[in-house]
Each structure stands twice: as C-alpha cells, then as structure tokens.
Image: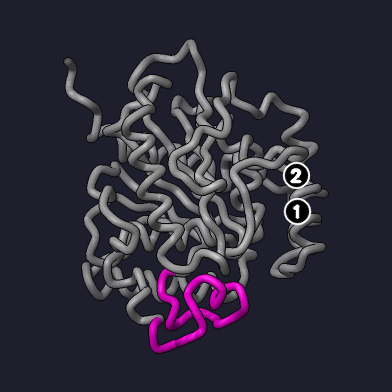
Amino acid sequence: MTSTSELPDEVLAELRRIGRTFTPESIDAVRQLLAPLHEARAFRAPRVDRDLTYGRDARHRLDVHTTDDGPPGRPVLLFVHGGGFVGGDKTDPVLPYYDHLGGWAVRHGMVAVTMTYRLAPAHQWPAAAEDIAAALAWTREHVADLGGDPDRIVLAGQSAGAAHVASFLAGHGGSGAETLAGAVLLSGIYDPPTAEHNVMLEAYYGSDPAAFAGRSALAALARSDLPMLFGVAELDLPDFHHQAAVLLDAVRQERGVLPLFVTVPDHTHLSEILALGLDEDAFGAVFARFVHGATTSRRSAPA
C-alpha cells in the first residue's frame, strides 16, 4: 500500500522500526533521520533574534523567529521544548531543532518564540512553570516590536514541555494563563500520581508520591475553558498514551464531551514534533489550523 505521508517511504519504515524504543541511541537516530530533510529546505525563519534574556538564570533565554516583511499583529506561538525534565534546549548548534519549528510558524503567518527553562534535579517543581510565566510576560511586553500580537499568543509544549505547560495552566507557576488565546500539549505528563514513576519524573516532581496529587494539573485542565489541542504520537511510549487516556476521561467527566485531540499517525514520541514542516498532513495542518482559529477571536481591536 502506498503511503499518503509527505515523508519518503524509507523514512516512515525507519520510524516504525524505531517505534516505541526510547534510548539515547534511538533518540539520536530519529534526530539524524529527519535532519537532512530539513536541511534540504529553507527551514529557518528569515530572521531569528537569539538568546534574549527573560530572567536572571543562565537558562532564562529565548529566540524569536520572525520576518521583517510580514504584517504587524501576527499570531504568536510560544514553544516549550521537551527533554525528560533534565535536558533539552531551544536550539541545537548542529541540527535543525527547534529552529525548524520557528521557520514552520513563520511560513504559516506566525511569530514564534522558543524558550529554555531551568532543569531538574537542580530546579524542581514548579520551577519550569514559573519560567513559562516569566517568558510569557516577556513575550507580551516585547513581541509587538517583532511583528506579533501580545493578545494572540498560543502556548505549546511537547513531552516535558507539555507537562510544564499543563502545570502553568493549572496555576502552579504564577499568573498569566488568562492572557493566552490557546494552548497545544503533545505527549505530556498531566497527572503525576498516575504516571510511570521513573528517575526523570522524580527528578522534577520529587521522590515522595504523597506530594504528587498536589502537583497534578489534571483537574485544572478539565475545568479550563481555554481553547486547547492535545495529542500523542501513534508510536508513542505507553505511559504517554495512558496519560492521554486519563486526561480525556477527566475532561469527559467534567464536561460530558472530549477535547480536541489528535493521534499523530506514523510518528514516534520525538518525530511527532521534529517532523513539523516535513509531514504536514500528520500534524502540522491541524496545528496551524488550531493556532489561527484560537487567535482569530483574540484579534486586537484597531487603535
């Protein structure tokens, strides 16, 4: 059967071979597999303002991806990277990630802000949610000068980034969530008590399971009226599928209906976000549609 994916069949076959394996070797394999496809395209935004500081810590840095010839007041995507709570960065000095996300956003008429944040175990819950609050405040103050609309910001995160976004939306990191137009959460941990307890989870949330219930974002997400898009990869790790099921059930019980949700076909935990711009039918199209839909109702009134 011929694939309808935009990715070459051999790349899809390799992603399926890697599947749910999640080791340093498989992580590097996915990153290296997709990098040449990005490099063959003009994947970066025309303008990237790098390492702007939004706080005092060395990791309080962000990049703004934009263009000088776009209209003012564009939707803004503030993206929070993953890394198992203990690693990750907004950009890689060698590979396209996450400059590829910034370029994708600009091609879809947005301004993108990619941020780093403090890492566990040195900085535990709710440090990253506090950093999101600070980065959001910086973005609201400065993004108009870079082509964006501070009243049309969508916050997005993947993996640990989605867990931190969820925590911020639950109010664990301070105020500011009420200013958002929407949020996108991919493959996150939303309810630590029902998540698989491992070294990385405990590095951030702590080793005392009795404290986990108070660190859950589940109830707050279920009650929230903020437009949100959730998702997992088809070939994601079982724990992320379980967290998605817990979330969907909590929203259904609270609201009687399911939230907007997508299972990204043919992709792994990493490739669901690393393939953005390469396989638009898998996730990019619904991602862009959500951002523009969520921000349309938040368009700033004319001066």
Q: Residue at x 72, y 27 (%)?
A: 41
Q: Given contact means CB atoms under 8 Å apart, are the residues at marks 2 and 1 in contact?
A: yes
38 with respect to 101 (left or right) = right
258 with respect to 89 (left or right) = left
> Is the C terminus in the top left, top right, bottom left or bottom right quadrant?
top left
Could you say whether the residue bearing mark 2 is in a helix, strand or loop?
helix
Where in the figure is residue 225, as x and y percent of width and height?
22, 55
Where in the figure is residue 287, as x and y percent of width and height?
46, 43
What number is the disc on residue 30?
Answer: 1
Where in the figure is residue 99, as x and y percent of width and height?
62, 35
Q: Residue at x 62, y 71 (%)?
A: 237
Q: Hey, what amino acid is under mark 1?
A: Val
Q: Is residue 90 above or below residue 261?
A: above
| Distance from Cα at disc 2 to Cα at disc 1 | 6 Å
Q: Hey, what amino acid is under mark 2?
A: Leu
The answer to whether residue 263 of the structure is visible from this angle is: no
Q: Residue at x 51, y 84 (%)?
A: 207
Magenta span = 190-211
Which residue is denoted by mark 2 in the rendering?
34
